[in-house]
Structures are given as structure tokens and as C-alpha cells.
Amino acid sequence: MACHFCTTSYPIDYKQPGELRRFMSGQAKISKKKKTGTCSKHQRELAHAIKRARFLGLLPYTLR
């Protein structure tokens, strides 16, 4: 299975929370790379972007 970010030139950006939600579970946890289908490099970038968006208040830490 090819990585979504390797096949497209789509950048991982913390300012697009709608796109980052695709890579989060229903409990607002960061999904594993096995489930999302991303490579190790892009999974690290994705986790960093999600954490940055959480800090800025664009994404929730948890869902109630």
C-alpha cells in the first residue's frame, strides 16, 4: 500500500484541521500508520502537525 503523501505532492499542514481529522480516531487519538497507510516519515510529520494544531486550539485533545 502506497503512502497517501508520497503519491501526491500534498503538504502536511497544521492549518488545515479538516484534513488532519482524517488521520485521527473517533476518540481524537492519532491513528497508527498501519491503519492510515502512511510511511514512517510522513507519520512523524502528521503527528507533529496534529500536536501543533491541538496546541493552537484547532483540534481537540479529547472528545466528550
Image (tube, rainbow, N blue to C red):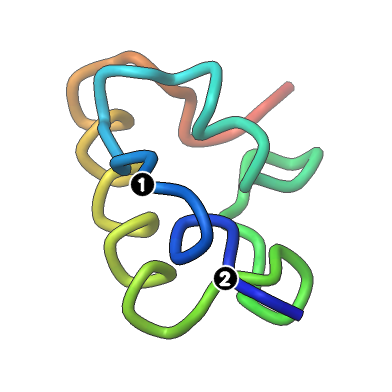
Label 1 Cα neighbours within 10 Å, binned few <14 / some 14-19 / many ≥20:
few
4 with respect to 14 (left or right): right
Which element type, helix, strand or loop, lies under badge 2?
A: loop
In the rendered image, which quarter is residue 41 located in?
bottom left
Q: Where is residue 33 in the image (x, y as percent from the top left)?
A: 62, 76
Q: Is residue 25 or residue 42 the one in the foreground?
A: 42
Q: Is residue 22 or residue 3 the one in the foreground?
A: 3
Task: Find the distance from the CA under tag 1 to the CA under tag 2.
Answer: 14 Å
Residue at the image position 36 percent from the left and 46 percent from the top: 9
63 with respect to 20 (left or right): right
Q: Which amino acid does label 2 sit on?
A: Thr
Vertical relation: 50 (above or below) 18: below
Front tag of 1 and 2: 1
Residue 46, labelled with which disc? none
Q: What residue type is labelled 1?
A: Ser
Mark 1 and mark 2 lie on one chain; the one further toward the N terminus is 1
Residue 38, labelled with which disc? 2
Locate the C terminus by quadrant.
top right
Residue at the image position 32 percent from the left and 31 percent from the top: 54
47 with respect to 63 (left or right): left
Residue at the image position 32 percent from the left and 71 percent from the top: 44
In the rendered image, which quarter is residue 21 located in?
top right
Which element type, helix, strand or loop, lies under badge 1?
A: loop
Residue 9, labelled with which disc? 1
Vertical relation: 33 (above or below) 54: below
